[in-house]
Image (spheres, rainbow, N blue to C red):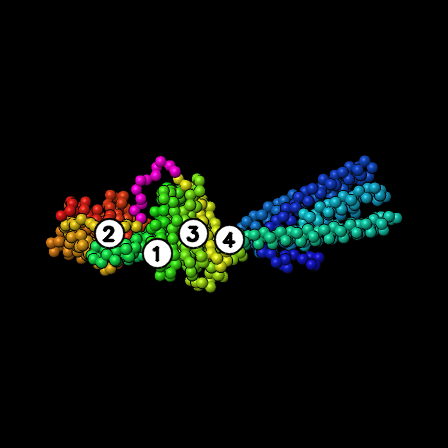
Amino acid sequence: MTFFQDFQNEGISPPAQIRLLNNTFLRLVFSFSAVPFVGIPFAIWIYLLGDDTGPTVTWIIIYLLCAVAIRIMHRRYQREVNVNDDEAVLRRWLPRINKVAFVHGLGISSLYLITPQTQNFDFFLLLNISIAAIVAANATHLTPVISTFTRFFFASWGVLNLGIIWRLDDLMFIVLMLNLLYGFAIYRHALTSHTYFIQQARLEEQSSRLAEQFRQAKEEAEQALLDKNQFLTTASHDLRQPVHAMGFLIEAIIHRNRDDSLTPQLLDLQQSVRSVHLMFNSLLDLSKIESANVLSAPTNVDVAALLDSVITLFREEANSRGLRLRIWRPKRRIFIMGDSLLVRQCLINLIQNALRYTQQGGVLVAIRPRGAECLVEVWDTGVGIADDDKSKIFSPYYRPELAWKIDSAGHGLGLAVVARCARLMKVKYGMQSLEGKGSRFWMCFTQHRGEDIPDTLPVCVTLPTPVRYAPLHGSCLVVDDDPLVTSAWESLMSLWGINVRCAASAKEAFAIIDEGFTPFAVLCDQRLRSGESGFDILKALFDRLPDMSGAMVSGEFNSPVLLEAEQEGYLVLRKPLEPAKLHALLTQWSGGVS
């Protein structure tokens, strides 16, 4: 570091340099204002000693005027800092502030040269100590910009030492040596103080960069979350279309099936489609929760009935791999406090995880009441988890080495979703595992024992036998542009005795009406490939056939058009539509069975 180094080699940005220059200039203004008051006691002393006070009073007046001028200069500097570029301010003002500091240093020590007390050692010694104190104070205050302090220090200390040589006689050598040692110590302290200021500026810059990086990362994450949720919301219609069609086709197959041996498999297939429907809803609900649009709402959940519907999803997989998938639960119904969608998501992920990493043996899902609580456990005889991996097993995108050896698929999100759902419901969760022996994952819920327990099982329980629907009569118009979906509509409703016609646009729909087709009901999809609004088509059909009944049927959940339709009193049905609900609705609209 050279004597007159400025910011060029400090490695800090212009904004940080401006902050340091602000501190230095402000302390310089304060020092200019304070120094005249140091000269007043010495002027009084000289007056009491009967000597001429003119030079000292003149010195005080000049310093007061300089202090006023420096304050005016500081205000101009502040105005320029607010409106000009940082680098331009540094180029313009750093040399000026250094010159002011140099003049300030000369001015302080000049009092040593103009005093008339040439033979009064006590006076000179006290004046020397006072100047040394001012220099020592500025060794901290002016060191944010080391070039400013250096100019001040060598101007003041150099003049002071020259004055000692000039005005002291016998004790000159001793005082000069002490001054030189003191000056060396002060300058070393100034360098240390400057290093501290520079480090502080770098830390502030680093903190600002990290804060900015965090802000950008946070905004990117929030935007990614919004994009994902928007994608799910937009894609939900297209994702639900095939599920909607499968539900209707499976219902039609079940009622046309004459082979009793196929009935259990068809019922499991029907339940699987329903589970896919629920998983779509769960996925959308989780997305809403992530975006803070929906809060988890604890309710009374029949955990055994919920488990029955989940097990259906994995029974065939377990059988095909020769694994035992068992359930243990008490005979009485157990209700827990939780969000049914989140509990279901947890069960699906835990059972799927257990089956994936179990090569022989099986998986046991247990519901164990424990006083006021209820444990939901998933045991497996799989590969287990190593001790080093246990603390990270619930982290997103983490898969232990043993898991990679069994199955390279997956992204390590299953257990992370379980942990997130558990935290949303504020329930405890955990695991125990022995490497090569198996694992136990558990969640601990509060058990509900209130009087508001329902008497009927939820609709998600697997139906033991096919439902036989009463025949209907009449005609129905379906406006949908997906051939697979329209085929499913025709297959199911024709089975019930309804004459079905399908149209893919307004033009086709009104052409069918013009042919003399008079439906008692119309079911209209909102999103059509033609770009037309299904809601507009439905209203136009109502204007043409005012005695007709009808509804919107869509897989979209956040559509402003559908919201408008509901607000205007139109019925909006969500895909996938349960055949039982559709049959009940058509029965009501047609006026009863045939």
Q: Secondary structure at mark 1?
A: helix
The answer, for residue 539, to whether it is visible in the render is no
Tell me which segment is drawn in magenta.
449-461
Inter-mark Cα distance, 3 to 1: 15 Å
**Disc 3 residue crowd, few under 14, some 14–19, many 20+, Cα 10 Å:** many
Inter-mark Cα distance, 2 to 1: 19 Å
**Disc 4 residue crowd, few under 14, some 14–19, many 20+, Cα 10 Å:** few
Residue under numbered circle 4: 214
Q: Is residue 518 left or right of residue 353?
A: left
Give whichever of discs 2 and 1 has the lower sequence position. 1
The answer, for residue 382, to whether it is visible in the render is yes
Q: Amino acid at mark 4?
A: Phe
Residue under numbered circle 2: 466
- Mark 3 touches mark 1? (CB < 8 Å): no
**Disc 2 residue crowd, few under 14, some 14–19, many 20+, Cα 10 Å:** few
Residue under numbered circle 1: 315
Give whichever of discs 3 and 4 has the lower sequence position. 4
Q: Amino acid at mark 2?
A: Pro
Give whichever of discs 2 and 4 has the lower sequence position. 4
* The disc label shown at residue 378, or none: 3
Q: Image point 78% across, 44% down: which residue?
A: 129
Q: Quadrant of residue 119?
A: top right
